[in-house]
Image (tube, grey):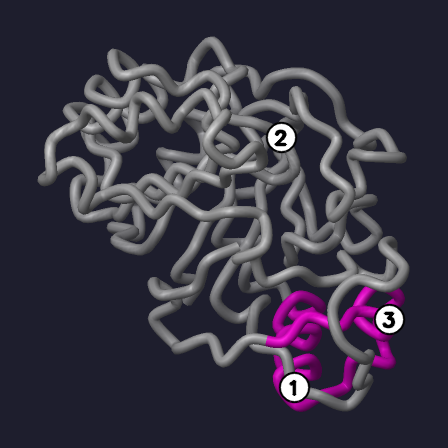
Amino acid sequence: MFRMVEIEINSQCNRKCSYCPNSFMKRKEQGEMESKVFYKLLESLRKIKFDGRISYHFFGEPLLCKNLIPYVKETKIQLPDSKIFLYSNGDYLDREKLVLLNDYGVDKFIITNHQGNGHRFQKVYDHISDNLKEKVTYLTSKELNLVNRGGLLEGVGGNVISERPCIVPKNLLVITCKGNVVYCFNDYCQVHTMGNIMERDLIDIWNDEVYVRIRTELAEGKRSNYEVCKVCNHYSALTEDGLDFEL
């Protein structure tokens, strides 16, 4: 069973980083996730007592979503054993929001600093308690593990090795803002969509024989069978529980 769920609560981002397809492309789906889609997803996860990692991004900036705080609060109510990770560029994360999100259940904040000492979040970080700092992973863009995002970015990451096993789809899935299930966070263009949670239950989608075959073949290193995977240079020594994996 999957251990990580990435929820695209909104598609917008205020930055166009060179290592992201947003710098020259536009997401297939636009806007914010409707609340009925979000709560349908939580219902499906609650049924299986999901206790893995939840985060609120695909290629967007979650702090641009007006519903982020209530979504975090409801996630922790419905899935009390889940681990909530918030990935953000930190541009809109002031001290008040940081404290509130922490109080409502965010377990880990992963913030990327693109501006050095001039980064907006730096002053916030410098004045929070040591206990709260322990929950914040504050990275520069140079510390990120960059990949070519399924072949979309030239000259980013290492060489493509088409026979290298990939177990990301066995551990993670992405729910887009329209409710579509994508089996990898590198599939920016949604080339490989498994179904929609408003049309089929999430677990039925996960157990679909086609989806099972894809996960099995990729774990065996058969990347060449899949359009995005055969040109992807992403590799991770992802553990089966998945909780130490940072995107």
In the orientation shown, which residue stands out farthest toward the front?
117
Left or right of residue 181, residue 79 in this image? left
In the picture shown, does residue 228 fall above or below 190? below
Q: Eyeballing the image, is 85 above or below 122? A: below
Reading the image, the residue beneath label 1 is 165
Q: Position of residue 46 (x, y in %)?
A: 29, 42
Give the residue at mark 3.
231
Residue 141 percent location from the top left of the image: 58, 48
Q: Main secondary structure of the magenta part?
A: helix
Q: Going 40% across and 77% down the picture, which residue do you hit? A: 239
Taking depth in this image into account, of 120 and 172 the one nearest to the observer is 120
Q: Nearer the viewer, residue 87 or 55?
A: 87
Q: Earlier in the sequence, mark 2 or mark 1?
A: 2
Secondary structure, mark 3, is helix
Q: Which residue is found at the position 74% from the left and 21% from the top?
A: 30
Residue 67 as seen in the image, left or right of residue 229:
left
Which segment did they paint magenta? Answer: 209-235
Question: Which residue is located at x 52 percent, y 57 percent?
Answer: 143
Query: Looking at the rendered structure, which numbered label has been put on residue 60?
Result: 2
Which of the marked residues, 3 or 1, is nearer the chain's N terminus? Answer: 1
Q: Give the image quarter of residue 198.
A: top right
Amino acid type assigned to the residue bearing label 3 in the image: Val
Q: Secondary structure beneath disc 1?
A: loop
